[in-house]
């Protein structure tokens, strides 16, 4: 599935927020994760189109998933919904099936590591984490990425960074091949429009 997310604001709004050094952050909702991480950010512009796909990667890192930590996906591998993956200390291997629409990750080492899902940022083409959870030996986590995103204008959130309160944002569920968002300046929010 691929959905184009269209973000539109007026030139006056672009000028205002560019002058303030603010940008838009997008995070994806992931069931099963304790901690979410912003997927991407973009600078103010009259129109920004983002391709949202259900393409994911599993990753791990030795960085502990705590508030404010910057996560770098040290080891990563493409992952597909409906599959289970195990980390054996050197690589991720597909080790079976997961429930429909989910990805399961198992830590098969004695190390305590941070695991999660990542997506490619369509603007930078770099790997961007979308969630992070700490797993010890033989622990596993099952993620269900949802077609729900949260958007926020400001300077607070950065990609590949853990935020304990990110789950408190309002998430918008979407479907179809195109979704439009308009900026509401009086409330400083992005609103999904028909």
Image: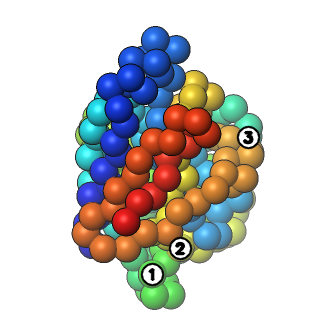
Image coords of residue 144 (percent x, y): 53, 73
- Asked if the residue under mark 2 is in contact with the one under mark 1, i.e. CB atoms within 8 Å, the reply is yes
Q: Nearer the viewer, mark 2 or mark 3?
A: 2
Q: Compare residues 189 and 29 and report the one nearer the observer.
A: 189
- Mark pair 1, 2: CA separation: 6 Å
Dot 1 crowding, Cα within 10 Å, few <14, some 14–19, many 20+: some
Q: Quadrant of the C terminus?
A: bottom left
> Going by the image, does 91 lie left or right of 63?
left
Question: What residue is rendered at 34% in x and 56% in y?
Answer: 180
- Mark pair 1, 3: CA separation: 27 Å
Question: What residue is rendered at 55% in x and 53% in y?
Answer: 150
Give above or below for 139 relative to 21. below
Image coords of residue 67 (percent x, y): 73, 37
The image's mark for residue 144 is 2
Q: Is residue 103 visible?
A: yes
Question: What residue is rendered at 47% in x and 21% in y?
Answer: 17
Q: Compare residues 51 and 9 and report the one nearer the observer.
A: 9
Q: Nearer the viewer, mark 1 or mark 3?
A: 1
Q: Is label 1 in a helix, a strand or a loop?
A: loop
Q: Is residue 25 visible?
A: no
Image coords of residue 183 (percent x, y): 45, 42
- Asked if the residue under mark 3 is in contact with the one under mark 2, i.e. CB atoms within 8 Å, the reply is no
Q: Residue beneath label 1, please? A: 101
The image's mark for residue 66 is 3
Q: Is label 3 in a helix, a strand or a loop?
A: loop
Q: Is label 2 in a helix, a strand or a loop?
A: strand
């Amino acid at each position: 599935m691929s959905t184009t997310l269209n973000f539109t604001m007026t030139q006056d709004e672009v000028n205002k927020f560019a002058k303030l050094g603010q940008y838009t952050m997008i995070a994806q909702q992931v069931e099963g994760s304790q901690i979410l991480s912003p997927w991407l950010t973009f600078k103010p512009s009259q129109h920004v189109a983002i391709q949202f796909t259900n393409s994911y990667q599993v990753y791990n890192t030795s960085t502990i998933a705590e508030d404010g930590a910057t996560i770098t996906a040290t080891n990563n591998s493409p992952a597909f919904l409906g599959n289970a993956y195990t980390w054996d200390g050197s690589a991720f291997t597909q080790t079976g099936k997961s429930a429909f629409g989910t990805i399961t990750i198992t830590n098969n080492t004695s190390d305590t590591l941070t695991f999660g899902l990542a997506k490619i940022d369509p603007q930078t083409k770099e790997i961007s984490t979308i969630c992070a959870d700490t797993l010890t030996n033989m622990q596993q986590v099952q993620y269900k990425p949802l077609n729900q995103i949260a958007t926020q204008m400001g300077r607070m959130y950065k990609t590949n960074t853990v935020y304990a309160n990110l789950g408190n944002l309002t998430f918008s569920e979407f479907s179809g091949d195109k979704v439009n968002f308009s900026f509401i300046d009086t409330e400083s929010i992005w609103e999904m429009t028909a």
